[in-house]
Amino acid sequence: MEAWGTGSFDNDAAIDWLRMLLDQIDDIVLVDMAFDLVATADGRADAARCQEALAAAELVAAAGHNPRPGLDPETLAWVERNWTALWQERRRAALAAVNGILRNSALLEGWRGRPDFEAWQADAGHLVERLS
């Protein structure tokens, strides 16, 4: 069964991306790749890539001492180990990715018309606030 919720980690793509980061790769390059894939797609990144970028942006927000409520201790520990690289070096990329997704993306189009569209949009908007 596919997970599809309004939160940044409430979908399969983000969950899989985070597990790969924590369990297999453990490298900040995955965060960069998530942002780059959305930035270079010029609004044409598929929904899964957008979900990964939102998850990466959540890590940056957590590094700025604004974590998503309920973020697990393992993820918070990873963020703590990488906080300088996340917050000081990737905050602008995170903001650009989230704003781009909210402006024009396959993920945005996927949410339009769904009954919980406004909840998803509010959650992503709150992420922008936590990154600002």
Image (cartoon, rainbow, N blue to C red):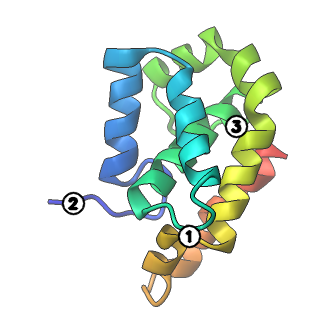
Q: Which mark is residue 76?
A: none
- Residue drawn 82% across and 24% down? 88
**Picture coordinates of residue 8, whole percent (x, y):** 50, 52
Which is more foreground, mark 3 or mark 1? 1
Question: Separation of disc 3 and disc 1 at Cα?
Answer: 21 Å
Badge number at residue 61:
3
Q: Secondary structure at mark 3?
A: helix
Q: Is residue 114 left or right of residue 118?
A: left
The residue at the far top in this view is 81
| Residue 33 rendering spot, x and y as whole percentages | 54, 35
Q: Which element type, helix, strand or loop, lies under badge 2? A: loop
Q: Amino acid at mark 3?
A: Ala
| Mark earlier in primary sequence (3, 1) | 3
The numbered dot on residue 105 is: 1
The quarter holding residue 20 reads: top left
Q: Does residue 9 appear in the picture of this structure?
A: yes
Check disc 1: other Cα within 10 Å, few if <14, some if 14-19, many if 20+: many
Secondary structure under the numbered disc 1 in the rendered image: loop
Quarter of the rendering occupied by the N terminus? bottom left
The amino acid beneath tag 1 is: Ser
